[in-house]
Image (tube, grey):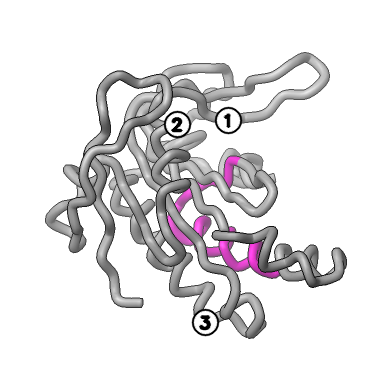
Amino acid sequence: METVRAVIDAKEDIYLNPTKRNLTVLFSDIRNFTTKCEKLPAEKIVMYLNEYFTEMVEVIFSHEGTVNKFVGDMIVAMFGAPSEVADREKKAIETAIDMQRRIRGMSVGWIADNFLTGIGISSGEVVVGNIGSPQHMDYTAIGDEVNIASRLQSMAQGGQILVSDRVYSATKDMFEFRKIGCVIVKGKKKSVETFEVIYGK
């Protein structure tokens, strides 16, 4: 549905066949979600997740992002596909900051108190398009930058936003950062320099 909306709203030609594109990828995941929800009834968990997803998707759309998919409690968003987005690294970081702040201000107190998310952002060339089988196709992105964003997200603590060196280089004059160091990503020989976005919580 999010991809459909992006296609409808786009003002230029959009190619859904697999193609190489430069884009920014954002992964967001709730820390210790299973542990925090184990004492809640399933219906309550679903209600809280839907409330959370609704707020987060609104934030992503407001910064011209596209929600690629939900995986459990994880959100994957793209900036630059299926339609082009100017200043995509800047908008991805603004999205991440707004997502973190929105959680803290949510009207459902249990969510505000228990949903602590880690966010990872990477940027570069990936393959995007309809990928799958004739029975089921998903518009998605694959490539090193997707793996890097996922790895950074898995490292991030609750409330933390980690970005790759490419995202840092594109936005270093726009935000405050703290250098974390080099991170090894599975399948890559070269390590990735990582930075934390410093923002007022």
Question: Is any part of residue 176 visible from this angle?
Answer: yes
| 80 lies left or right of 162 | right
* Residue under label 1: 140
Indicate yes or no whether the magenta region holds residue 194.
no
| Numbered range of the magenta stretch | 51-68
| 18 lies left or right of 108 | left
Q: As shown in the figure, which amino acid type bears the numbered disc 3?
A: Gly
CB of mark 1 within 8 Å of CB of mark 2?
Answer: no
Q: Position of residue 93 (x, y in %)?
A: 34, 56
* Residue under label 3: 105
Q: Which residue is rendered at x = 28% and y = 70% of the image?
A: 199
Label 1, secondary structure: give it: strand
Label 3, secondary structure: give it: loop
* Residue under label 2: 147
Q: Which residue is rendered at x = 51% and y = 41% of the image?
A: 10
Label 2, secondary structure: give it: helix
Residue 86 is marked as none
